[in-house]
Amino acid sequence: MAKINVLEKQVAELIAAGEVVERPASIVKELLENAVDAGASSVTVEIRRGGISYIRVADNGSGIEREDVAKAFLRHATSKVRECDDLGQITTMGFRGEALASIAAMCRVELLTRAAEEEVGTLYTISGGEEESLEDAGCPVGTTITIRDVFFNTPARMKFLKKDVSEGNSVAAAVEKAALGYPGVGFKLIRDGQVRFQTPGDGHLLSAVRCVFGKEFSENLLPVHYESKGCMVDGVICKPTSARNSRSMQNFFINTRFVRSKTCMAALEESYRNALMTGKYPSCVLNLTIPPQTVDVNVHPAKIEVRFADEKSIFQLVYYGCKTALGIANLAPELKAEDLQQNPSKREVAKPAAPVQQRMSADAYRMTLAQKVEHLKSAREPVYDQTEKMDSVKPSAPVRFPGIRVSPEAVLAVESPVPVLQKVAQTSSRPAPVISEIHLEPPEASAPGETSAETLYDGARLIGELFDTYLLLQNGDELILVDKHAAHERLLFNRLAAGGLAEERQLLLTPVSVQLSPEEHALVTEHLTLLSRVGVTAEDFGDHFVLVREVAPILADADLPGLVTEFAERLSCANGNLLPGQLEELYHRIACRAAIKAHDRTPAPTLEQLIRLLQQDGNVGHCPHGRPVAIRMARREIEKKFGRLG
């Protein structure tokens, strides 16, 4: 039988240190936490060779008194915790008293510090856990710790370090997280003699975000502020149009401590449901302020993972906070001249070629310009006359509209569009759906600087339709392009989600019977009320059939058997209990089936009615798939593209 030995102090310290110090980034993280806890307003981090050979962290905090300097490097020596009850009230970043001891066990450490009440500073050196010197030194108030030769006495751990660049990137990430968690502290990172980034420490999160992630990222954010049951979430989230291909830009903080939380991540992504395309993920910098006794930060040596006493309340806090912020999101992204490239995706990965300067005489330039004008005139199609009034059109003169021809009957039906639209639909290649009047509550006021639906479409004039898919509107000095399918789909989805199809019904001339499996039949007949809420009135017809007799007008042309079957399948997968997210997905599918289709010709009155409904609804920024409903382009950008601004 193997004999049990008591490990020597040095061996035990190396093993314990390995749980805290994994790489240079671990060291920087622990030292940054100590600097913040010391009340520093300015912290400078300098590294060389990715932090493997040299790390220096300097702060202007309270410093360490001389009598406590050596004690600070003892294991489990801390000023943050005294009794067992203190573990439930942790509000500081560091508290275990393991950081400095672990670092000193594996590195060569030099500490220079002075407390405010002391006239002379202290220089302390310790290497491999063995104290070397303690002497007087001149220095400002604060603490500077210099680390050299990481893992010098544990070569086995050196083998697991990555290249200098990778280790340096990890250190930079640690400093960035600290800068985002503490915007009131100015952080500077110096890497191999070059300043990589510096935050102002002005207390504004956007300032820190701009310094860490850049101007483009910071300009596409929405502020978040939400309180519930004594908890609060603050920060920023990205606009749906700025979602990324990965979750790498999701940053969560609990009481300013950076954490990785599946609960917060799931709540964030759930709040973007029906606003993002598949494969896109939202970005965020969110700080949750919650009572310290409701979260356990002592479940992981690096304090990256935490455990909540009530996961559900945390989920709801993040979900409703982000959902509220998205409710006032910009409805239409602005398209700029530099975005009008023939291959935008290629532009992102390829550097643009240097412009080629051409010399041309004035006569040659005029001749070239005249040729282009003549070419445009010959290729130009009839365009809808913007000055022509609908009420002045005579029955004998049909209105010219890009891509469609509207009969005189449709033109005269503006005052009572629904009956005539039904008549016009009979002559089209595909029936044009009737856009029923949707009664909506007035949208909430938008945040300053945001574009509401009313502002976006108020005063807009319909000037044409492009490719039988996109509506062209002019509003002041802006051109607005609206995806008619996406717009109608979102309007229908909003109405379904609000229960707006529960009342209106249209009797079918021929009832539609739908055959289901025994299990599905039982579930559907048990949830006929829910089926009615989505616009389908059905009844049990016996022998595993249900009979659809009435539907909401917008579903008159929909595939009713497919709709009922899909409803049954979703009930079956959910064991008869559709969760809110699953119900939203069902609404999404129904809206997609019933909406105006792209590439189909649509009468002008229908399109004008669609614009009016968009103006009424305050939440039509994106279709349920996550694609934008509209994009804007300023007149200045158009004129810049044509070279009119020089």
Image (cartoon, helix red, strand yellow):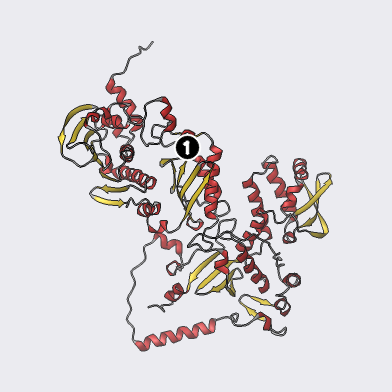
Position of residue 264 in the picture relative to residue 589 (left or right): left
Residue pictured at 23% horizontal, 49% vertical = 193
Looking at the rendering, which quadrant does residue 507 occupy? bottom right
In the rendered image, residue 35, in percent from the top left (x then y), is placed at 30, 40
Looking at the rendering, which quadrant does residue 397 occupy? bottom right
Residue pictured at 63% horizontal, 68% vertical = 612
Residue in the foreground of this view, choosing between 517 and 280:
280
Residue in the foreground of this view, choosing between 424 and 100:
100
Q: Amino acid at mark 1?
A: Pro
Position of residue 619 in the picture relative to residue 336 (left or right): right
Task: Say if residue 154 shows up in the picture.
Answer: no
Q: Is residue 35 above or below residue 205?
A: above
Kind of element beneath mark 1: loop
Residue in the foreground of this view, choosing between 287 and 8:
287
Q: Which residue is mark 1?
A: 291
In the rendered image, residue 300, in percent from the top left (x then y), is placed at 42, 32
Residue pictured at 31% horizontal, 48% vertical = 186
In the rendered image, residue 129, in percent from the top left (x then y), is placed at 24, 27
In the rendered image, residue 101, in percent from the top left (x then y), is placed at 29, 29
Mark 1 Cα shell of 10 Å, populated few (<14), some (14-19), many (≥20): some
Task: Say if residue 536 shows up in the picture.
Answer: yes
Residue pictured at 24% horizontal, 47% vertical = 192
Quarter of the image that includes the N terminus: top left
Residue in the foreground of this view, choosing between 570 and 390:
390
Position of residue 425 in the picture relative to residue 43 (left or right): right
Position of residue 243 in the picture relative to residue 490 (left or right): left
